[in-house]
């Protein structure tokens, strides 16, 4: 798997402050890409930037609240100012909430929709502006197995619905790009259980979040980062639509 043609190109990674986004930043940094790291929390982004810079990666930190349109636009402005725009967008930031449709809160659903679906779509629109005229550019959405089947018994119906929307947007955009004769590639990655900060946020409880990873050996963030690398490593004429990967012991 070679990422040599992406060396020196710019990748924007949302949700780079932890988990899958952070692991992906390390992998793309090793490949010689320039990296824009976005999330709300500046402190973990700064510490990742220090690590990457020490390893020779050109990095900028863009503290961003994806629930705010103006914050997303400022994030793209920062990348345009630094490097003239993005070549690769890793739409990774996301969250779920432990609830049922009968008892969930409107405010929680709004947050899930705004981050997982709306911000992801605005980021795609802005990235397409930067990618216009480029011979080589790629968008990767970090989706979920929940994009394919609402997880049974997990109180994650609304989260799963948001990831179904990500799948719809990914596939619909692919059609739009093909119709336009665009060289921009669009794909998604659909992980099962990955050991990250996701479940602490899902349960709003650190301990319960940790317990989610005791049933079987979960995927590690780097497993998803490696799938990103594989997707990016394919030659320009090859388009991977989706990579579904689960822990060995995860049934669905
Ligand atoms: N972990 C799993 O089992 C699993 C499985 C399938 C799919 N996924 C997907 O993988 C992606 C990454 O999640 P993860 O597992 O790495 O979880 P994580 O460790 O909780 O990371 C989530 C990231 O999203 C960012 N984020 C959340 N709300 C944001 C907002 N309003 N503005 C900007 N950034 C925001 C967080 O940064 P800040 O808090 O600093 O803003 C954090 O960097 C998500 O899309 C998730 O749905 C995860």
Image (cartoon, helix red, strand yellow):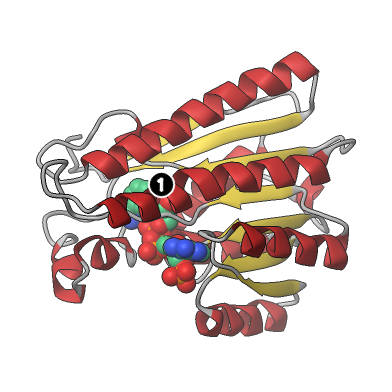
* Rendering coords of residue 185 (x, y %): 68, 32
Q: Quadrant of residue 237?
A: top right
- Residue at image coords 66%, 49%: 89
- Residue at image coords 71%, 17%: 178
- Residue at image coords 14%, 36%: 152
Question: From the viewer's perspective, is 91 left or right of 222?
Answer: right
Q: Quadrant of residue 85?
A: bottom right
Question: From the viewer's perspective, is 171 left or right of 9?
Answer: left
Q: Quadrant of residue 57?
A: bottom right
* Rendering coords of residue 30 (x, y %): 66, 64
Confirm whether residue 131 shows in the render. yes
* Rendering coords of residue 72 (x, y %): 64, 59
Depth check: give the residue in front, 206 or 231.
206
- Residue at image coords 53%, 42%: 141
Confirm whether residue 241 shows in the render. no
Depth check: give the residue in front, 55 or 159.
159
Depth check: give the residue in front, 60 or 33.
60
125, above or below 86, in the image: above
* Rendering coords of residue 121 (x, y %): 58, 41
Q: Quadrant of the C terminus?
A: top left
Please rate how many residues cluster around mark 1, counting C-alpha atoms within 10 Å: few if below 14, some from 14 to 19, many from 20. many
Figure quadrant, ligand 1? bottom left
Which secondary structure, mark 1?
A: helix
Q: Quadrant of the N terminus?
A: top right
220, above or below 121, in the image: below
Depth check: give the residue in front, 6 or 89.
89
Question: Among all residues in the image, which is located at the extreme top?
Answer: 179
Question: Among all residues in the image, which is located at the extreme front?
Answer: 106
69, above or below 64, in the image: above
179, above or below 195, in the image: above
Q: Dot 1 corresponds to which residue?
A: 113
């Amino acid at each position: 798997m070679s990422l040599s043609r992406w060396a020196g190109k710019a990748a924007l990674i949302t949700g780079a402050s932890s988990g899958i986004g952070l692991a992906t930043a390390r992998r793309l940094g090793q490949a010689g890409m320039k990296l824009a790291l976005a999330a709300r929390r500046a402190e973990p982004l700064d510490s990742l930037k220090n690590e990457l810079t020490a390893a020779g990666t050109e990095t900028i930190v863009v503290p961003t609240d994806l629930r705010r349109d103006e914050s997303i636009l400022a994030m793209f402005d920062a990348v345009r100012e630094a490097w003239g725009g993005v070549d690769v967008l890793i739409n990774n930031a996301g969250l779920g909430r432990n609830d049922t449709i009968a008892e969930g809160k409107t405010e929680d659903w709004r947050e899930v929709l705004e981050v997982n679906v709306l911000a992801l779509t605005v980021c795609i629109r802005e990235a397409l502006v930067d990618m216009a005229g480029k011979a080589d550019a790629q968008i990767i959405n970090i989706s979920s197995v929940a994009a394919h089947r609402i997880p049974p018994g997990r109180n994650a119906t609304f989260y799963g619905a948001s990831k179904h929307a990500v799948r719809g947007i990914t596939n619909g955009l692919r059609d739009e790009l093909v119709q336009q004769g665009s060289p921009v590639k669009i794909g998604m990655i659909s992980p099962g259980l990955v050991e990250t900060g996701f479940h602490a946020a899902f349960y709003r409880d650190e301990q319960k979040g940790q317990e989610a990873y005791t049933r079987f050996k979960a995927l590690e963030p780097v497993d998803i980062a490696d799938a990103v690398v594989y997707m990016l490593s394919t030659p320009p004429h090859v388009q991977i639509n989706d990579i579904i990967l689960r822990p060995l012991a995860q049934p669905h």
